[in-house]
Amino acid sequence: MISKRKKVVLAYSGGLDTSIILKWLQTELDAEVVTFTAEIGQGEEVEPVRAKAELLGVKPDNIFIEDLREEFVRDFVFPMFRANTVYEGQYLLGTAIARPLIAKRQIEIARAVGADAVCHGATGKGNDQVRFELGYYALQPDIEVIAPWRQWEFTGREQLIDFAEKHQIPIAKDKRGDAPFSIDANLLHSSSEGKVLEDPEVEAPEYVYQRTISPEDAPDQATMITIDFERGDPAAIDGVTLSPAALLARLNALGHDHGIGRLDLVESRFVGMKSRGVYETPGGTILLAAHRGIESITLDGGAMHLKDELMPRYASLIYNGLWFAPERAMLQALIDTSQEHVSGRVTMKLYKGNATVVGRESPQSLYNQDLVTFEADSGGYDQRDADGFIRLNALRLRIAAARDLRLKSGK
Ligand code: ARG
């Protein structure tokens, strides 16, 4: 019996590594390759990928190129920002949040074309392999996953280049040697890792940064903008309504010009090791500050503190590739519920690497100037009520202090 030729949907960037994977699937596994390329704002043209895939022998019907920018920002980035999500206190999860979307589309395409397997180009050492594959399995439990970096015989860059040459894969001149570092980019961020960045003691060279100017070179003149929020999501800049992707792109441009959103971080990977990366999240950094600004007047204190407690848990779920896990959906429901009144306008000052909230207003505000004013008692607050409030809150502290004094004096 002849076994059926395997049909594989490959997440294909058009770059050298995934081109090698494409050929390897065709030659070593004798697979029929279907390529999927997502435009998610990585800053490289995706259409030229079509010609490249064809050149490598992929049938035109088997080439999928899709613009997912709006879906990426609307259904992944914005929901995550409703939680003010940061991993290990600093990382805005730009790579982690894009993986579930790519996995989802890959599985949908696999179903549409009747493929047996899906394949990605993430290495065996990182988080991304976990994120892709947990996504695949969550959406299609019986899917076969091919992870060439964990399977093939190649041991070094040279062997890969040899293989590429043997199979007439075009190699850009600067790709012959080792790349100076590895990049992952989308509308939310660029991430750089490896090579020149591997020693965490040494400052990252300026040329690593690609979507922000250095704060030192940023203009002496601040830019003021307003961001309007509706139920926790940004909807307009300076009063102009923009689609999710257009809005984030606009914030990226503003952040770029003011050197906002650079991060040099050592983080804990899910697979257990520490790694050092340089991140640039210009628009996201402005958005995070602005969202906290609008929440500060519209979100109840108790609700905010609960969100803040749960946020690191939610961040870890996304970092670890568990976007499609039930507990992420549960947390999302809680977070989304909290955003019912998170609407209004925030005024931001962008200046030399900083995005600072300088004004906030909302028809749904909880801020009551009559209540908080130093001027006179009004708005239903009686300062004498604070007497009993403090007395009762102090009760257990006084009991404990009295005991400690008693023990110290030996009585
Ligand atoms: N360490 C980051 C993460 O796990 C980024 C990984 C991909 N970045 C790269 N330059 N290859 O989210």
Image: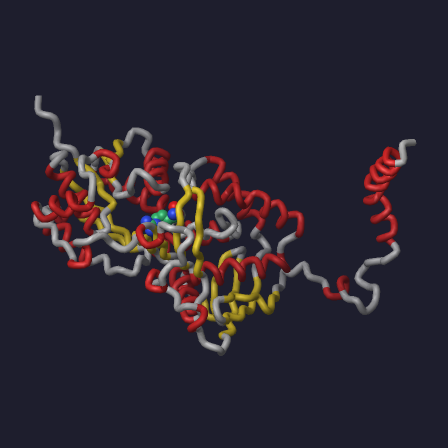
> Which one is in front, 215 or 84?
215
Q: On screen, 200 above or below 293?
A: above
Q: Position of residue 230 (x, y in %)?
A: 52, 59
- Residue occupying the far right of the picture: 411
Looking at the image, residue 397 sits to the left or right of residue 12; the answer is right
In terms of image quadrants, where is residue 271? top left
Kindly identify the residue that appears in the image at 16 percent across and 44 percent down. 160
The C terminus sits in image quarter: top right
Q: Position of residue 394 (x, y in %)?
A: 83, 44
Looking at the image, residue 388 sits to the left or right of residue 246; the answer is right
Q: Position of residue 311 (x, y in %)?
A: 54, 45
Residue 62 at least partly seen: no
Q: On screen, 286 above or below 336?
A: below
Residue 365 at least partly seen: yes
> Which one is in front, 109 or 406?
406
Kindly identify the residue that appears in the image at 23 percent across and 48 percent down. 12
